[in-house]
Image: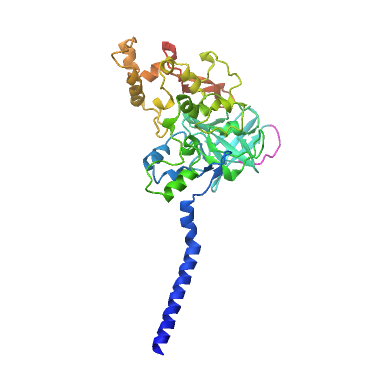
Amino acid sequence: MGIKKNLLNGAGIVSLLFIASLVYHCKNGKTESDYFNPEILATHFNGEQFVGSETCLECHADIYTTHLETAHYNTSAIADSATVKGSFKGGANILDLKDVSFEMRQERDTLFQYTTIKNRNVDIPPSKFDIVIGSGVKGQSYLTWENDELFQMQTSYYTPLDNWVNSPSFPTYSYTRPIGDACLKCHMTFATNKNTGPGNQYHKEQIVYGVDCERCHRPSAKHVAYHRNNPSAEAAKYMLKLETLSRQQRLDACAQCHSGLRQELLKGTPFSFVVGEDLKKYSQNYNAAPVDNSKLDVHGNQYGLLTSSECFKQTATMDCTTCHDPHKNQRGNAVYFNQKCMECHTTDSVVCTVETSQINEMGNNCIACHMPKMPSRSMTVELDENSPETPFYVRTHLIGVYSQQKK
């Protein structure tokens, strides 16, 4: 009898353990499932799925970590006190223009732009800072949601003065600008517009911020899922290998954003193109014919300037990554870029004709002389109600010999 009772008790304990284990796995099985099937952030028009650059961390930690410091990665973000560089402190939070003034306020964890129209008694609801556009190297602009419609706010941040300014190309009266795909495509990895044509209505939950890994390496859900399920696999699966692309395909990866506005859509939306395809089948500038180099603006058309340079024309291999590593923040690293110049222009093949005093003044810096900073005609800001438009200075990618006045 005692043996039978012990057997029954043992069976009961086993059953309880089995039930407890079953309940635990039912409740916690999702964790394992999520790992092997990463969360889908958005789906590209070609059916491929974005899972975010954080999924790259576990296998590519070094590249992921340095990429976080790049202007590409930080070119858009959710707006908060950490990402918005402008001041919300009294006395430094005012932008005063001819017909309107703005006051930036922080209310708990939320940032607002309050608008006052001069000489008019009109109540304008505050605009919430929702999205940051720009890494802050030269400045930032800000976007606000009105339901599912996206607008650019009138106040921007100008880094050289550490101050608020009128947003580029905005008038001096109260104004908001609808934001379409053509504006977002160079600051986000992906966004889904609710309109079949141009519009500013978006699916908020399907925005991938910053220019991250998947913008250049394509949506990577299949790649991540495969390698998490096959950790011993060494060959990259379901991933675009940039070294297998032609020079023009590699250039197109950068040209999608760095070749002018490309406002003439030929196929899909500004987010339809993926690296490895033929960019000219998707979009082009209104003036697709060759133009005078002097008409290529230094802001946004680095591709056109570079491909017009003799350095580019006289080699079959030079592309953007010849000098730039998109995984690292190399801004201001003159030594690195000068070394890149000297890989082709050795002291045996090139003699600098500039006087020694000028060479010393320029710090023996090839870039300062042959790729000087120039004012942009397309990117200007109005600092206050009395100032003329002030251009952003951007380093030209038209590599050449410039007069002393342009250095």
Measured from the top left, where is residue 164 in percent x and y? Answer: 54, 32
> At x 35% / y 20%, what residue is drawn?
341
**Quarter of the figure with the N terminus:** bottom left
**Quarter of the figure with the C terminus:** top left
- Indicate the quadrant where residue 97 lies: top right
> At x 43% / y 75%, what residue is drawn?
14
| Rendered view: 56 above or below 407 | below
Measured from the top left, where is residue 112 in percent x and y? Answer: 58, 41
| Rendered view: 317 above or below 184 | above
> Can you see residue 126?
no
Of residues 369 and 187, which is closer to you in this image? 187
Of residues 180 and 83, which is closer to you in this image? 180
Task: Give the tally of numbered discs.
Answer: 0
**Is residue 12 part of the magenta span, yes or no?**
no
Measured from the top left, where is residue 113 in percent x and y? Answer: 59, 39
Farthest bottom residue in view: 1
> Can you see residue 213?
yes
Of residues 332 and 217, which is closer to you in this image? 217
- Indicate the quadrant where residue 327 lies: top left
Is residue 363 rendered to the left or right of residue 36?
Answer: left
Q: Which residues are magenta?
A: 119-127
Magenta stretch, main secondary structure class: loop
Of residues 301 and 122, which is closer to you in this image? 301
